[in-house]
Amino acid sequence: MTTLNIAAIPGDGTGPEVMTEAVKVLQAAGSKFDFKLGLTEYDLGGHRYHRTGETCSDETLEELRGHDAILLAAIGDPSIPPGILERELLLKIRFAFDQYINLRPVRLFPGVPTPLKDKGPDEINYTVVRENTGGLYTGVGGISMKGTPHEVASQTMVYSRHQVERCLRYAFEYAKHHGKKATGRGEENTVALVGKTNVLTYVFDLWERAFHEIGKADYPNIKRDYYHVDAVCIYAVQSPEWFDVLVTSNMFGDIITDLAATTQGGMGLAAGGNINPDPGGVSMFEPIGGTAPNFTGMNVINPLACISSGAMMLTHLGQTAAAKAIEDAVIFVTANKLKGTCAGEMGYSTSEVGDMVAEKVAS
Ligand code: IPM
Ligand code: MN
């Protein structure tokens, strides 16, 4: 029997509560689909930082590297200055394992209310491929003359051809296999580049040239579109059905996927994966949302984003039937059980929602 060695990082706030449910569901899937879950828990996050000062040491990184994948629930704590856990833990893992793709499906499940008028599951169904290790997140910049009236701060958007190219290729491959035509939802598979070619005339010139060169040479059957990032914010609300696969830079991807998550019923449902697609790469799956400190310990937070991130992890590890069973179970629960999707509005507790998904997977 296959054993999947998973490093679980429950993290802070409501992270441990949603992780418990994700593990419950993964275990149910393992029993049904004949794999074993070899789980190692890592208590990284705010508690560990307060206790020991450690965010994520090199030794811990090496241990994580020994796993098939990482599942992270949420990290961040209001008692810790912003940037420490983000940069020294979350981004550190993304960078150390070269998880250069952040895959964020935007899918409105049946039964889930969306704030978008007259839009349903057929219209809100697309994927954002966010470049995940470059751009403004690289940390190029600094402050000089700090604290004086003349101080200067800079933070530079940097991209190499290599970074741009591997991200674009992933997006084209993704569209080829999961685009609208590939999945019987439309006439064409489309990749749209999201940028700001009218202002960021260096970085997005590089992206745009690489996009068309690669598309033309290697993916002639995939349609290519382009949107400015500000326009995407309009269309994501007005015409999300225009989108199939969107590919974009790190910061733009961060921002538009929060907007997109709202259209799919909120952070409680938005799953994602930090992926290193290369052979031997270690990927980390994590819900898009944060730690929701106001709801911590109340058993009211929605665990479905973490559960769905677990399903994405299984897909990545080749357990596609198990992943599909979890996705179907999540859809069954949203369509037939939940009264709402936000914390405290589900009509069920966090653990009850996990139970219902696990039962459905097992059935
Ligand atoms: C996300 C988060 C992170 C990011 C933060 C916590 C560093 O907002 O995963 O979207 O900006 O990537
Ligand atoms: Mn974000």
Image (spheres, grey):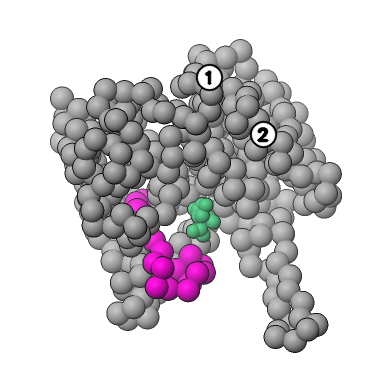
Q: Is mark 2 within 8 Å of ligand 2?
A: no
Quarter assignment of residue 304 = top left
| Image quarter hosting the N terminus | top left
**Number of residues whose C-alpha sits closer than 10 Å to that of mark 2, classed few (under 14), some (14–19) or many (20 or more):** few
Q: Earlier in the sequence, mark 1 or mark 2?
A: 1
Q: Where is residue 211 drawn, in percent x and y?
A: 73, 37
Q: Check disc 2 and give the amino acid type.
A: Ile
Q: Where is residue 29 drawn, in percent x and y?
A: 22, 35
Write down the region rendered in magenta.
Answer: 69-88
Q: Is residue 346 magenta?
A: no
Q: Nearer the viewer, residue 71 or 334?
A: 334
Q: Where is residue 356 drawn, in percent x and y?
A: 19, 33
Q: Which residue is mark 2?
A: 234
Q: Residue at x 61, y 51 (%)?
A: 250
| Image quarter hosting the C terminus | top left
Q: Are marks 1 and 2 in contact (CB under 8 Å)?
A: no
Q: Is residue 49 left or right of residue 241?
A: left
Q: Where is residue 260 drawn, in percent x and y?
A: 54, 37
Q: CA distance from mark 1 to mark 2?
A: 15 Å
Could you say which disc has been placed on residue 118 in the image? Answer: 1
Q: Nearer the viewer, residue 57 or 262?
A: 262
